[in-house]
């Protein structure tokens, strides 16, 4: 048996022994009583009885171990023409001081704090300061509109909101403060204070009674120490798209998260302390949480906070410039970024300008890695191209190629093998396991390993109904796919109405809820259509109310604007179309899956429950009239 196979088997058969050993990589104030408390399934608790502090493990212990002068964070911002290096010692000072400022505002263990920040080092400082105090952070991606921020504020009920005056997004400057003011006007919950980091690129108008200037706050604050928390206490809540307008608040604990994320750095990414690891994502996404902030810092590596794009800042050689300038060993990004580079520089001319000798591997995730992009990247970079599959819920890879243990042969189209800790199966709708090669629902046998979601924040019922009840004893991933005869997992796509736009997870259901509020719209459906650059794009189909006279071009423009304003520009809803009716089942359910297949040129079976089969002919010609399928 190979070394990987042996470790994998141990992780499944003796999970407590396996994870107890991995937990040695973390500093504990008090060791756990039980590695896995399985007394109340499916609410599994890892390292129950143990106490520790995540910020201490990510920052202070490296200073104490003599890494104080090593760079912890490289802030590389082509959009503001800035490069700044922060050592572990400086990071410790910054975090302790800002945590002191939060403490002075009354933030204590268990309080929630919402963070709405661009890609600047202060975003990391804010997250780590919360962890230092045992407060629970909830980072909201800066590309979400005010109403999405308001929804999260209402659910997370933060004592304090931390933000910056604005961001530079590609070539645009975006003022955050008007968005924050609007969100707080919309939300029922009111924060006690907003702490705003003023940037040179745009200045925020402050409200005297509520807003505090970050720099002023730290002038007078006392450094705060790390607070002892239980391993099972929450570290953060991260809202992610479900099938409705109300996002799911994935709750991650402190102990299990630190153990698993720390373990993954060496075993999945082959990263040691001192290596430079770059995750070109955003702190607002799970990739940002796990692999811009916590993973590299828990390992004592150097992480890069990149405020730029793969193209246009200034060109499609931006990634090669960062890799060569900072001697990056490993890059992690979404396939979309590579498709964008390929489109601008198909022959890879720009890479020739740079010394790429430090670069050892490219990791891709967030959406399916198409074989064209895989081969293009592989031919250009001459390093292993590692696809790995995971979700906000799991927090780290479910299936991947664990190069730190043993590199496996790659099969294009598959993220390779289940990672230690994950017992992955494929079942039919009745929950019966399917033979190799047959496509079905991908599920994971419980218990999930540490670091995965503990529950949904203040919504245990939804945690159970979304993930734990359809297939008893298994976690439902909502992804479909198959496992081949060699055990390689092939992930084919979501089985629900969640779509992936440029590696960003969004809900078509949420978009439908916005469109349905238009006074002229009787009903609507939003479906995900295949797109060569962004993977998927939403397409809105709507039926007008009887007697509406307005020009449908006006209505289309309204809908595009509404989605931008209510959800955010990242939803990228640019195309909508009026149709006479939507195909439905006899019980009135809109046949979104069938329409999706038609729009994407995939074969489909006529649903036996369809109300009127001619409605499908109508929708097929309407979609053809719009140029679908496009790819
Ligand atoms: N704040 C405000 N607006 C944002 C934003 C942010 N943080 N991020 C994106 N937007 C806006 C963009 O400005 C754009 O607005 P526009 O419609 O006015 O032009 C819109 O949202 C769509 O953005 P994006 O999807 O980034 O499209 P793009 O055309 O600007 O860039 C790519 C295309 C492929 C270069 C870009 O999507 C990309 O870098 N993708 C990789 C994504 C990634 O790394 N995901 C992480 C998951 S691992
Ligand atoms: P998110 O929660 O934003 O990370 O999105 C998770 C979803 O992205 C998964 O459920 C998949 O549908 C998709 N996804 C992520 N990584 C991959 C991958 N490597 N291959 C295929 N799909 C992926």
Image (spheres, rainbow, N blue to C red):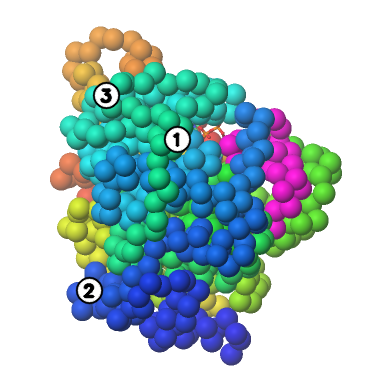
Above or below, comparing residue 551 to residue 114 in the picture: above
- Spot occupied by residue 571 in the image (x, y as percentages of width and height): 42, 34
Quickly name the residue at label 2: 41
Left or right: residue 132 versus residue 608 is right
How far, Cα to Cα, is label 2 from label 1? 48 Å
The residue where tag 3 is placed is 209
Q: Nearer the viewer, residue 98 or 118?
A: 98
Q: Which mark is residue 100?
A: none
Tell me if the residue at label 2 has its CB under 8 Å from ligand 2: no
Total numbered labels placed on residues in the image: 3
Can you tell which of label 2 and label 1 is closer to the viewer? 1
Disc ID at residue 219: 1
Tell which circle, 2 or 3, labels the residue nearer the N-terminal end.
2
The percent position of residue 388, horizontal first and vertical second, equals 54, 61
* Residue appearing at x 21%, y 19% in the figure: 519
Q: Is residue 9 above or below residue 552?
A: below
Q: Are marks 2 and 1 in contact (CB under 8 Å)?
A: no
Q: Are marks 1 and 3 in contact (CB under 8 Å)?
A: no
Distance Cα–Cα, label 1 vs label 3: 19 Å
Q: Tell me which label, 2 or 1, sits earlier in the chain.
A: 2
Label 1 neighbour load within 10 Å: few <14, some 14-19, many 20+:
few
């Amino acid at each position: 048996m190979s070394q990987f196979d042996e470790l994998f088997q141990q992780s499944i058969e003796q999970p407590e022994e396996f994870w107890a050993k991995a937990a040695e990589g973390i500093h504990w104030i008090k060791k756990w009583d039980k590695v896995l408390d399985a007394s109340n399934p499916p609410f599994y608790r890892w390292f129950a009885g143990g106490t520790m502090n995540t910020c201490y493990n990510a920052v202070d212990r490296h200073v104490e171990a003599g890494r104080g002068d090593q760079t912890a964070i490289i802030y590389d911002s082509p959009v503001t023409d800035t490069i700044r290096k922060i050592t572990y010692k400086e990071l410790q000072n910054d975090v302790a001081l800002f945590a002191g400022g939060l403490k002075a505002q009354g933030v204590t263990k268990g309080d929630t704090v919402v963070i709405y920040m661009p890609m600047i080092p202060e975003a990391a400082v804010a997250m780590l300061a919360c962890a230092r105090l045992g407060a629970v952070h909830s980072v909201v991606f800066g590309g979400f509109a005010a109403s999405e921020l308001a929804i999260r504020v209402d659910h997370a009920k933060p004592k304090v909101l931390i933000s910056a005056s604005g961001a530079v997004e590609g070539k645009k400057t975006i003022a955050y403060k008007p968005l924050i003011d609007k969100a707080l006007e919309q939300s029922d919950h009111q924060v006690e204070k907003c702490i705003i980091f003023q940037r040179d690129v745009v200045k925020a108008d402050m409200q005297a009674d509520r807003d505090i200037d970050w720099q002023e706050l730290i002038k007078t604050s006392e450094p705060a120490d790390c607070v002892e928390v239980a391993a099972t206490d929450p570290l953060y809540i991260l809202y992610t798209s479900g099938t409705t307008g109300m996002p799911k608040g994935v709750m991650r604990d402190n102990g299990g998260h630190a153990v698993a994320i720390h373990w993954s750095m060496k075993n999945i990414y082959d990263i040691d302390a001192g290596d430079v690891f770059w995750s070109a994502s955003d702190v607002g996404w799970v990739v940002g949480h796990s692999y811009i902030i916590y993973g590299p810092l828990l390992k004592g590596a150097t992480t890069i906070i990149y405020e730029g794009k793969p193209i246009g800042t200034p060109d499609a050689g931006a990634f090669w410039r960062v890799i060569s300038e900072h001697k990056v060993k490993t890059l992690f990004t979404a396939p979309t970024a590579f498709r964008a580079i390929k489109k601008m520089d198909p022959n890879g001319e720009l890479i020739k300008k740079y010394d790429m000798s430090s670069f050892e591997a490219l990791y891709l995730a967030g959406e399916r890695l198409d074989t064209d992009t895989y081969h293009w990247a592989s031919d250009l970079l001459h390093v292993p191209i590692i696809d790995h599959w995971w979700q906000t819920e799991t927090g780290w890879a479910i299936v991947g190629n664990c190069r730190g243990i043993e590199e496996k042969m790659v099969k294009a189209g598959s993220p390779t093998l289940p990672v230690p800790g994950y017992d992955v199966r494929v079942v039919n709708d009745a929950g019966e396991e399917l033979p190799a090669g047959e496509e079905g629902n991908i599920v994971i046998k419980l218990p999930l390993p540490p670091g995965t979601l503990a529950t949904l924040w203040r919504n245990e019922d939804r945690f159970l109904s979304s993930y734990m009840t359809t297939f008893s004893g298994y976690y439902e991933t909502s992804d479909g796919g198959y496992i081949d005869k060699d055990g390689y997992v092939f992930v084919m796509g979501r089985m629900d109405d969640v779509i992936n736009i440029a590696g960003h997870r969004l809900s078509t259901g949420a978009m439908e809820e916005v469109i349905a509020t238009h006074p002229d719209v009787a009903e609507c459906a939003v479906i995900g259509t295949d797109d060569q650059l962004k993977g998927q794009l939403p397409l809105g189909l709507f039926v007008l109310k009887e007697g509406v006279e307005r020009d449908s071009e006006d209505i289309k423009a309204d809908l595009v604007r509404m989605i931008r304003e209510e959800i955010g520009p990242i939803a990228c809803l640019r195309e909508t179309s009026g149709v006479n009716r939507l195909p439905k089942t006899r019980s009135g359910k809109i046949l979104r899956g069938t329409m999706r297949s038609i729009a994407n040129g995939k074969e489909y079976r006529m649903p036996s429950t369809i109300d009127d089969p001619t409605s499908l002919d109508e929708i097929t010609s309407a979609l053809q009239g719009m140029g679908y399928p496009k790819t």
